[in-house]
Structure formats: C-alpha cells, structure tokens
Image (cartoon, rainbow, N blue to C red):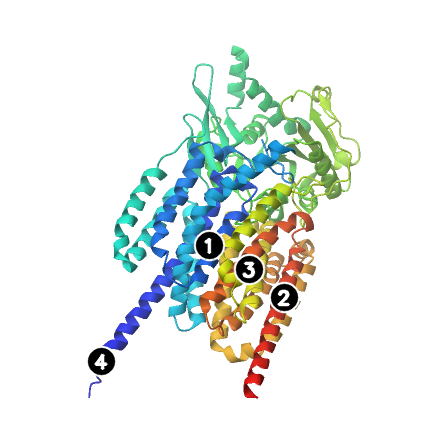
Amino acid sequence: MEQPINSANQTSTKENKSLVVELLILSAVSLYLEVLLIRWLSADVRAFSAFRTFPLVTCFIGLGVGFSLGKDRFFSLAPVFLLISVCAIKAVEFLNISLIPFPTNSITSWGQINGTGLTFATWVFFLAQVLFCILAGPFAAMVCIGERLGVLFNKIEKPLKAYCINIFGAIAGSIVLTALSFFEISPFYQIIPVMLVLGFYVCKLEKKALLATAVSLVALVVIGMQNRPVEPNSRTIWSPYQRLDLVPILGDENEVIGHHLLSNRIPYQSAMDLSEANIAKIHATKVNHEALETGLRRYEMPYKLAKNLDDVLIVGSGMGNDVTTALRYKAKSIDAVELDSSILNLGRTLNPAKPYASPLVHAHCDDARHFFNATNKHYDLIVLSHLDSGYVVGQGSCSRVDNYVYTRESIARALTLLKPDGILVLSYFTVKPWFNDRLLRTTTAGAGYQPLEFADSRDLRFANTYYVLGAAVKDHTFKLPTELAEFARPPVHDLQPIRLLTDDWPFLYVTPGTFDLPYLFVLAETLLIALFLGRKFLTARPGPEAGQMFFLGAGFMLLELQAISRLARLFGSTWLTSSIVINGVLIMILLANFLVIQKRDLFVQKINLLYVLLSASLLTSFLLPVNQIVLSVPFGELLIAFLTVLPMFFAAMIFACSFSKVANSSTALAYNLFGAVLGSLLEYAANYIGINKLVLIGFTLYALSWYAMARASKSKSKSKSTQAD
C-alpha cells in the first residue's frame, strides 16, 4: 500500500535545501569579497601599503556586527554599499589622494612623508580620516552580508552543519579568486559577479529592492569603468601580486624606446634596449640619453667585477635589463629568476632587446629564496640587483615578498651556490645610512666575513651601494678593476647598533629605534570605532561561551597569519603559497568539524585533552629549528609545514566542540569574528618581537580561551547545583 505524500515535509525539505545553497553561496561571496578588497585597496590606495591589515580588520568587524544583529534589516542595502565602496576607491583616484603615502615613522618607503610637528600631525589626522571613509563602504557591505549569514546560521538546526557549509563556501570563494588573479583581470570586473549574486538574493528576499539593485548595478558599471591613468598613454595590468602601470619611454623624436613600470603606483623598473647594437648606435650618433647611461653603469657593474661568466644567476630579473647586460658581456648560461609572471611576460614581449628569447637564457617564474633552496647548480656570478618588491606576502601579512632574500640565512645559502672563484654582487638603493648598516651587518653575518662595500660617486640622484662576496673577498685578494676604482667611494653609515636581518626578523624596511605613533593612532581609532559600532552587542550580558569564542578567534587568526609568513620562506613568497595556506587551514577546519560531528560526545568530554595537545603543538612549533630541518631532513619543508599548521587543527577541534553546544550560533560567531580582529592587529607585533614569538602570543590567547571555558563551566555547574537545592 502506498504511503501518503506529506507535502509539508516536502516544502520543509525544499526550504532547507534553499537555505543550504544560499549559505554556501553567500559564504563564498563573503571570503571572495574580503580578499578582493584587501588586494584592490592595498594596490590602488598607496596609504594602505602601510595598513594592509586594516581592510581585513574592517571586513571582520563588519561581519561580526552583522552576525550580532541576527536580523534581515539591512541585507537589501548590500548592493548599494558595494556601489559606495567602488565610488570611494574611484574618488580618491580622481582626487590624486591615492598617490599619497601614509606618514609613518617605522616603515621606510619611496616618497614617504616624514617628520614631526603640527604639519606632520595634520597629515596623519587627515589621511586617517580618508582611510576610514574609504573603508566605510566595505564595512557596511560586510555588515549586510554578515547579517544575512547570521540569520541563515540560526535557521539551520545544527550549528556545526551550518559551519561546515560556511567553510565549504569560503574555500570555493578563495579558489575562484585565486584562479581569477592569474588572468590579469581588474578588481573592478571581479567585483561585478559579487554585485550580481547579492542582487539576486536581495531581490529574492525583498522584491521591492529590485529597482535599487538594478540602479546600483548600472551605476557600478558606469563608475567603475572611469579610469584615470597614472601617466599619459599608460596602461594598467593586474598581476597576481600587484597593480602594474606600463608607461612608454619616448626618444628624441617621440618614438617609443622602452617602457617604465610602476608597481602599485610607485616607480619600479624599466625595459630599455641595452643591446650592443643599440648602444653602439647611440654612441655613434652622440644622442644624449642620461638615464640610459646611468642605467648602463648600474647594470654593468656586476659583470665588470666577475672573472668568469660561464654560469650566471640573476635574482629579480624583471623585464630583462640585467639579462640583456649579461648577454652583452658574453655569459654562456643565464638563469633568470622573476617572481611575477606578468612582469616576466612583459619582459618577453616589450623589452626591445628581446633578452628572454635567447637560447642561453633560462627563465624561472619563482621566488628567489625558494630558488636558492631548490637548486643545486653552482654559478660564477650571482646578481641580486635592486630587488625591491614594494608589496607584501598575503592578506594582512606585514612581511614583504622580498624580505627573505636579504636575511642572514638567505645570504649564507646563496653563497653555497658559488663556484670556488665565483662572486655574489648585491646592489641596493640605500636611501638611508642605516640601510647600509643593516645590509653590511647582515651580509657579514651570513658570509662570516665582511663584504667589499662601495658606492659609485657618479650616482648623484640615488645612493646605489654594492656588496661583493666570494672566496676572493674573504681572503682579501679581490680588487676592483682600475676603471671602477677611481669612482668607488665608501657608503655613508650611521655607525649605530642596528638589528640584523634573520628569517625570524626579516623586516629590511623597518626603521631602527622608532615607535610608530601614527600607526598606533590609526589603530586606536579603529578599535574605538569597532567598540562603538558593536557597543550594544559587546555591553549586553554575554553568553557563557562568549569569552572562549572571542579568544579562539584571536588565536586562530594570529596563527594563520604567522603560518603564511613562516611558510613563505620555505615555499616562496607567492600568491599561490598564501592561497594554499588559507585553503589548507579551511580544509583542516572541515576535517575537525566532521570528526566532532561523528564523535561529538567523546571529543566534548576530552576537550581539556585537546587543549593539552594544542599547547604541546604550539610549543613544538615555537621550538622548531626550521633551517636545520629543511637542509638535513628528507621532505623537511613538508614536515615544517605540517608542524606549523598542526596547532590550528587542534584549535579547530576545540572550536567545533564548543560551537556544537552554543544556544545561538550567530552570536557565538560574532564573538569569534571580533576576536579575529584582535588577532589580525596583534600580527603587527612581529615588527618588534619577530615572527616566531607570535606563537607565544597565540599560546597566551588560547590559555585565556581555556580559562574562559573553565569559568563558564564552573558557573553552569554552580547554577545547576543552586537549582537542584
């Protein structure tokens, strides 16, 4: 006999599936938009190069506020606030504010605003407010998305099931954005799908929002397509790492003789015809190309110092000028290493000398430090030529991608790749005397002897300093060629004690002996705004799980950023490394959730044991002799990676156990997100204490989460005992 069909159950099943799909898609949108905004703002607004963490913090605050509301009051405004975000970015571009660096005392960068007094303080205050105006749109958009996510979490019966769906969505969003980043697509075009998805769900929830959504979409397209080039006739390329602006170099008759390249709106490098035929032509016609002559001297210097050029390694080969010079000096085999695939392609297509087309040149799209670790080839000459990235490792990280090239350990490893009579030449625009101090001390520590150090007196505009290392320098038999010796002068030094660069403290650009008050001012203002926006939620009587959720969020975010910085030195400071770490962590969270779902009662009873395992794994991570393991243990890099992320697995298990018991999942996640804000901001402490000691801060945060859990558990037991009496 057929069973009657229960239409109410069918309707309920359809509604549940619809909720699951919506939660999955909006979770993907939230992480996709978060990382996209971080990338876009740090590239298009120069002041965010000093505050890369702040877009991340803003997104977490917005999501946290949204989750805490638990209602659908503002979700219909999400497309409007997304439009406002794009308008703010375009406004600072057309007002030329995007080119202004933030005044800072602790990070040295080209063209920065330095100083003290009223004018300096005015700049700090003005630009701080500009930053917050820019971040207002992303914050509001994230509030809307977080609000809807909170509603969906509460509608799904089991908190862990909802959290698993949320993590699946986050992984999907991260993978999609990572894939798109390799197609050189402008962030503006990448944000349009977000508008379409949000518009669909907004109109589905509230049909009268259709007109506002349609107008927002049209306005987004119209406003987003308005571009102001940084220079006349320039074009913009979005590489996986940065915004690149290509500006033509015009000759005496307005013909294009090369290209300048700007990185995130800052002058970066160039591609000129440095071939032997073109140089002979210029000298024969006596055309005055001062920039070309200056560039020639700098590019030629390493090749005039080397005895043999059978095998040459160029680190940071860029658009190919170093490679052209090596070919002109008859190098027989050239390994050219360049991190950014877009720059490498520009060198192949736009460098007039076509150096990458030579069969003698072997191009490697790789991180310099990773190439040092991976190769066993030996070279007559290793060139580290003005390797200055200008951009950082990944979302929220304070480590720049070139940091690990200049550390003591990196120099020591590079020297092992030299042939017995080979030399390493490091050149850098040392804009401050303390740069010379830091590089001299670091290269000395890496080599075990002092390098030959000199500057070229003909370089009047920039202080270009050269550091030469090799066996001949060590035994004092190396001599500068006569044609160079007359122009060599000692670099300017501060002669003050200065911190050398190590893999734990690789921050070349951190100014010694300063405390960055402008940064702390913006940090304090950010925290005050966060407290104000979340005041009703934070001042209300918190649930028993609030403290634990908060500190779990803080510890987890801090460890994730620390892992990105640590693993970048092993696998390369690449966008792909950051993406793999982020997605690997998300997959671990999923695994932890599945284990707890299967054996919930067992793991909940053993939560104290999980805290013990977490503590042990944190201490193991802190004590790891990273370089010794990498160089002496088979698959050492994978072992380091496993031990670095292992604490986050135990932390995810603890979170899953605790989250499975919460009465209100959206409120618990709100506290967790507010904690993540604290963890993001604490990562800045690495500039002072080093990357490895962040693990100890994480240990403290997790100890506080255990204390909050124990106190809540004791309070519950006392309450039950009172009720029983």
Foreground pick, 699 / 206:
206
Q: Nearer the viewer, mark 4 or mark 1?
A: 1
Q: Which mark is residue 62?
A: 1
Q: Amino acid at mark 2?
A: Leu
Q: For this view, does 417 lie left or right of residue 289?
A: right
- Residue 407: x and y in percent read 67, 44
N-term mark: 1 or 3:
1
- Residue 34: x and y in percent read 45, 51
Q: Secondary structure at mark 2?
A: helix
Q: Is residue 587 above or below residue 370?
A: below
Q: Amino acid at mark 4?
A: Ile
N-term mark: 2 or 3:
3
Residue 185 visible in this rendered orientation of the protein: no
Q: Residue at x 65, y 62 (%)?
A: 700
Give the image quarter of residue 460: top right
| Mark 4, residue position | 5
Q: Nearer the viewer, mark 2 or mark 4?
A: 2
N-term mark: 3 or 4:
4
Tags 2 and 3 touching, CB below 8 Å = no
| Mark 3, residue position | 675
Q: Which mark is residue 574?
A: none
| Mark 2, residue position | 704
User: Are there few (<14), some (14-19), or many (20+) residues within 10 Å of tag 2?
Assistant: some
Q: Between marks 4 and 1, how big is the CA–CA gap?
A: 44 Å
N-term mark: 4 or 1:
4
Q: For this view, does 113 lie left or right of residue 586?
A: right
User: Are there few (<14), some (14-19), or many (20+) residues within 10 Å of tag 1?
Assistant: many
Q: Is residue 702 above or below residue 342?
A: below
- Residue 540: x and y in percent read 51, 65
